[in-house]
Amino acid sequence: MARPYWFPETSVQKLPEPLNLKGDKIIVADAHAPTYSALWANRMLAVARNHKIKECVCIGDMLTVKWANHWDSEADKGKWSEEAQLMGAFWWTLIHSFEELTLLFSNHCRRVNRATNGRVDADTLINDIIMRFALENNYAIPPLRDRLTTSQFSYSYLDDDWLLCHPVQSSVNKLKVANDLSQRWRRNVIAAHSHAATLGYSRCGEFQIIDCGGLYDEDRMMWRQIDRTTAPAWKNGFVVYKNGFMTLCHPSMEWTPIDKMFEEEV
Ligand SMILES: [Fe+2]
Ligand SMILES: [Fe+2]
């Protein structure tokens, strides 16, 4: 009888595990720099400082990467050097405002990989932006490797119970994607990408679900302005995670005292 054969283990490496973050955080997404909202970015910083939160996790789309846009509606995609210049101060402020900054990748980050056939990724571009800004202003380059962590994954966990995610899906129904994620992955969920600030509970009632809004400036986003569509309205926002509690910060809150804080300092 012929010798029996068995399949050998493949030599292809397994993927690394996604990040499992711990402890108090400011959770932001969708700044779409350079079309970020200084108002919302400063509100986020003011709240972080008030709560003495030293770590920030960004759930994707923190930069737009317009030069690698593959949609046809914007004929003028501009140059990377111009786009980098426009967001130098944004990334400089972000990297100097937290002891730890974690960036999860998303659809806009992955434009870079697609446009360069995988030769460059968003991690390289963000480092490039910060170093350019330092050189142009004669500033010392910050310790990026100690302070900045990027993940190719579009999700991470937080204190095991939370899934932070920049999903590829979207829906016109608020919280639908966050709800579906919570049912599939059996966790509380913070979902980015929908640009809506909304919170609630999953259909089964077991999980908290949050759409975290974003730090974008809708008025400066050409694709959002040049057409009138049936897409739902957006709402800026971000999330504070402190002592195990999640708080969604959104436009309907009383912002006057917070806004005064950074207006007086400018
Ligand atoms: Fe986005
Ligand atoms: Fe997105």
Image (cartoon, rainbow, N blue to C red):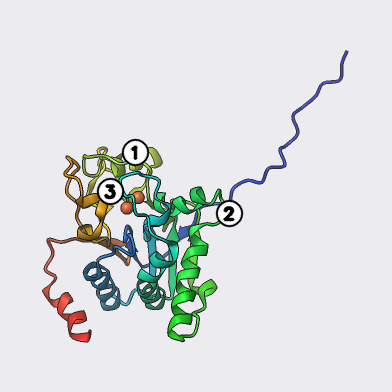
| Tag 3 residue | 194
Q: How many marks?
A: 3
The residue lying furthest to the front in this view is 75
The percent position of residue 68, horizontal first and vertical second, equals 43, 52
Mark 3 and mark 2 in contact? Answer it, CB < 8 Å. Answer: no
> Vertically, is 210 above or below 205?
below
Q: Which mark is residue 119?
A: 2
The residue lying furthest to the top in this view is 1
Q: Is residue 165 left or right of residue 116?
A: left
Q: Is residue 198 visible?
A: no
Q: Amino acid at mark 3?
A: Ser
User: What residue sits 39% from the left and 71% below the top?
Assistant: 85
| Tag 1 residue | 183
Q: Nearer the viewer, residue 28 or 140?
A: 140
Q: CA distance from mark 1 to mark 3?
A: 18 Å
Query: Looking at the rendering, in which quadrant would you find the C terminus?
Result: bottom left
User: What residue sits 19% from the left and 59% below the top?
Assistant: 219
Q: Is residue 151 left or right of residue 10?
A: left
User: What residue sits 46% from the left and 86% below the top?
Assistant: 138
The residue carrying pointer 1 sits among few (fewer than 14), some (14 to 19) or many (20 or more) residues within 10 Å by Cα, namely: some
- Disc 1 is placed on an element classified as helix
